[in-house]
Amino acid sequence: MVAASGLALPRVSAPCPVRTRGGLRPAFLRVAQPVTLPPPQLRCCASTVDDGVVSAAASKPRLPRVVGMGSKLVGCGSAIPTLSVSNDDLSKIVETSDEWIAARTGIRNRRVLSGDETLRGLSIQAAQRALEMAGVKAEDVDLVLLCTSTPDDLFGGAAQVLSEVGCTKAFGFDITAACSGFLVGLITATRFIKGGGFQNVLVIGADALSKYVDWTDRGTCILFGDAAGAVLVQACSADEDGMLGFCVQSDGNGQKISAKEGNLLMHSNERKGSFSLCCPMRATVH
């Protein structure tokens, strides 16, 4: 074979095709015998550091996949910002009054982040208090679920929170489900315990809606504040199972979120989105 430049190219013989049910298939793609794979093992991975080199090492496997495992609440904690905004304070911003807000919502004060306070800081405090009540060490936590729609980091904050709390062996991720986020996280925690062999799952519900509320809309700015709450869900026997059941259904029709001048503004009109959730659960916290 001679190329356009005049150089002789080596002749490459194409593999002899073989006929299959789907047509012609090159011989080198044909598998003579089926490949037998070893049975999968449920293992978690830990990192070890030796002379500055990080290597992955297989650690002790988690609990086996036991469908009969139950889950129970063994600790809870909460955290709120220092700044309190009263209805009278809001009446200086929008046309409203303490009587008007209290009669329709029952709210008289709400907490709002200020200064150097962050949602991550509130989440850390709530998580630490939940672990303290449960009497469980941070390094014994297997999973951290951060349920929030307003994270400090859009790439997720669970990993940062679990690192600050000291959950060195835990896996973590964020759950975004707005007002239903905490209950979705609670259900998720029980599923990881029942089907994944996890022992201790930390569920944190936290939001800082003051960063997104339209403070000129009296229909919404009177409702929202900033706070964080956490519970520790722990594996138990089926006889002690505190999750009595759950039923979820979503309908997002009509939800209206608009962008204006680079900021998300929440509006009260035509908000028809809903999330129905029923999640009865016994608690063993005293």
Image (cartoon, rainbow, N blue to C red):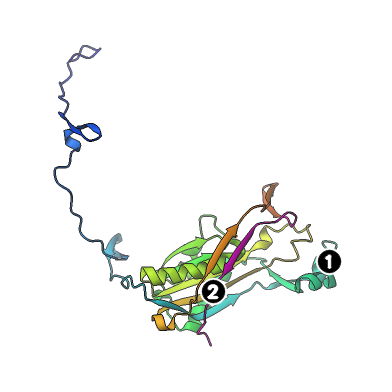
Residue at screen point 63% across, 70% down: 227
Instruction: Pinpoint residue 239: horizontal percent, then vertical percent.
Output: 41, 83
Residue at screen point 64% across, 52% down: 253
The quadrant in which residue 82 appears is: bottom right
Q: Is residue 139 left or right of residue 264?
A: left
Closer to the camera in the image, 18 or 42: 18
According to the image, label 2 marks what residue?
230
Separation of disc 2 and disc 1 at Cα? 32 Å
Instruction: Pinpoint residue 5: horizontal percent, then vertical percent.
Output: 24, 12
Looking at marks 2 and 1 on the same chain, the residue that comes earlier in the sequence is marked by 1
Query: Can residue 94 be spotted in the picture?
Result: yes
According to the image, label 1 marks what residue?
91
Over which residues does the magenta segment extend?
267-286
Q: At label 1, which amino acid type do we have?
A: Ser
| Residue 96 within the magenta-colored segment of the rendering | no
Q: Is residue 38 left or right of residue 241?
A: left
Q: Is residue 264 above or below residue 9?
A: below
Instruction: Pinpoint residue 108: horizontal percent, then vertical percent.
Output: 77, 74
